[in-house]
Amino acid sequence: MLNDPLKLQLMEPFSVEPRTTKQVADLMALKAPRLYRHVEALVEADLLVFIRKQPKRGIVERDYQTIAELENDISPIVMRLTGRVSPKEFAALRHKLIEWLEECELKSEEEGQIPLRGLITFFPLKAVYTK
């Protein structure tokens, strides 16, 4: 799903605040019709969630965001990062994340644990809009 560069780029603006597809298209200097099917695919994959709809000039605008509230009063972890790392540092981070994810997947269901779903993505800034 996120091996499509456009879908990956769409995740960033929706992570900031609820936005419509048109608002994201304007930020990315693209035409909204090009993005609708990509946004729908991200919604179907549970990577974007529908927040609200509002009528505007005879159409219904839908706001989406990259997170949903979790059950059991657990707040989602949302981080927006911008920085620089060397290829060696990036490789070390990748290795640590993979180890942690494998550890989580091996856990059996235990009392008090809740299932979670997440998305961790790092990408070069040149691949994303810079506005």
Image (tube, rainbow, N blue to C red):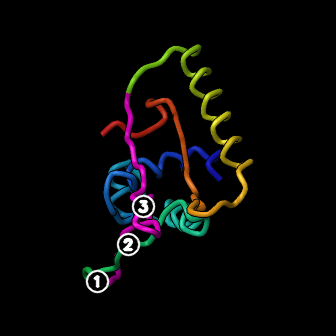
Q: Position of residue 18 (x, y in %)?
A: 33, 63
> The magenta stretch spans which residues?
59-82
Indicate whether residue 63 is drawn in magenta. yes
Indicate which disc residue 90 carries: none
Q: Which mark is residue 74?
A: 3
Residue matched to label 1: 55
User: Dividing the picture into quarters, in which one does residue 69 lie?
Assistant: bottom left
Instruction: Give the class, few, some or many, for how many residues have Cα within 10 Å of label 2's Cα (few <14, many ≥20).
Output: some
Q: Classify mark 2: helix, strand or loop.
A: strand
Mark 1, Cα crowd under 10 Å, few <14 / some 14-19 / many 20+, is few
Expressed as whole percent of the image width and height from the top left, the position of residue 129 reads 39, 40
In the orientation shown, which residue stands out farthest toward the front?
111
Is 117 included in the stretch rendered in magenta?
no
Tag 3's secondary structure? loop
x, y percent for residue 28: 38, 48
Query: Secondary structure under badge 1?
Result: strand
Give the mark nearest the N terminus, 3 or 1.
1
Residue closest to the eye, 6 or 70: 70
Q: Which mark is residue 51?
A: 2
Question: Which quarter shows the C terminus?
Answer: top left
Labels 2 and 3 touching (C-beta < 8 A) = no
